[in-house]
Amino acid sequence: MPFQIIRQDITRVECDAIVNAANKTLLGGGGVDGAIHKAAGEMLLEECRTLGGCDVGQAKITGGYNLPAKYVIHTVGPVWRGGFFREKEKLESCYRESLKLAKANGCESVAFPLISAGSYGYPKDKALKVAVDTIADFLFENDMTVYLVVFDKNVYEISSRLFAEIKEYIDNNYVDEHALLRRTRYLNAGIQSVDACMPTMCDCASMPMSELDNELKNLDESFSQMLLRKIDEKGITDAECYKKANIDRKLFSKIRNDINYKPKKSTAIAFAVSLELSLDETEDLLRKAGYALSHSNKFDVIIEYFIKKKNYNIYEINETLFAFDLSLLGN
């Protein structure tokens, strides 16, 4: 998946580069900065002394030393002062300049902390939106795997308004699996046997082979075929589709080249979001892969919420899924 939100200690993330939320001196500090310097060892500090500091919104690169990452990219975020001193612009620059450095140094993967959201006081929901939007803009033009690393779930916040709306939607639409099972039993109370509603082995065995052959020759279009048809109907390129779906190019190539490819449910939904399908169209696409949306699944209820709202921003959807401790969309 090109963009992932993960809960991890950034000093333990195995990738080409990790980003350090540094101060202007680049000589270490508290929080993420101190943890990275401690894990990397004294050689990181020695190299940082040669860099001459760093301005807010800019970035500089060093070796990773004892870290699992090859590089450390140091960037200085803005201190929050009410949003009246170009804090958003400076924070966006932190992400952009760090990503440029990563690309210039041949990095295929980079991990970010949530910059400025700690002691610098940037409101966490606003810092999160800047991070996701800026990274998303970069990934639409570039191929790279980017991680947003959250060590403590308490530092991760989506908009309180959005969280409240989705919580209410779940409360109103989510059906507990056991309650659903009980309801199904009540509905089936008049049926003496479930088997009476199902085709028997004899029914299938009695079908003439010629009829069975005809049925097999007239199968509906597969998931792959429907996906490619929808891309053409929407008038977008393959790259636009898989990037908006947070799917990497290699997986999309597999789907395109295998008419019978069966994706994971999260991948199928990601494509539905990318194509901005209606709820009915999403259900149709999911059926091609053997899936359905259910009100006994909170993941599905949240997906339904966003589609009904016509909010097809996959990164915002993934922020919400992460906040509810659910799997993310993409491959």
Image (cartoon, grey):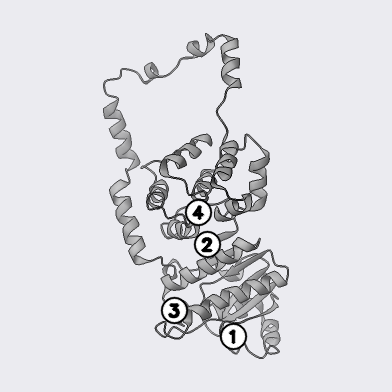
The three-letter code of the residue at mark 4 reads Leu
User: Earlier along the polypeptide chain: callout 2 or callout 1?
Assistant: 2
Q: The residue tagged with tag 4: helix, strand or loop?
A: loop
Residue at (44% x, 83% y) in the render? 80
Q: Nearer the viewer, residue 326 or 261?
A: 261
Name the residue carrying label 2: 5
User: Earlier along the polypeptide chain: callout 4 or callout 1?
Assistant: 1
Above or below: residue 82 compared with residue 254: below
User: Earlier along the polypeptide chain: callout 2 or callout 4?
Assistant: 2
| Callout 3 crowding tier (Cα within 10 Å): few <14, some 14–19, many ≥20 | many
Name the residue carrying label 4: 328
Q: CA distance from mark 2 to mark 3?
A: 19 Å
Name the residue carrying label 1: 28
| Callout 1 crowding tier (Cα within 10 Å): few <14, some 14–19, many ≥20 | many
Mark 2–mark 1 CB contact (< 8 Å):
no
User: Earlier along the polypeptide chain: callout 1 or callout 3?
Assistant: 1
Mark 3–mark 4 CB contact (< 8 Å):
no
The three-letter code of the residue at mark 1 reads Gly
2 vs 3, front mark:
3
230 to the left or right of 67: left
Q: CA distance from mark 2 to mark 1?
A: 25 Å
Residue at (31% x, 31% y) in the render? 184
| Callout 2 crowding tier (Cα within 10 Å): few <14, some 14–19, many ≥20 | some
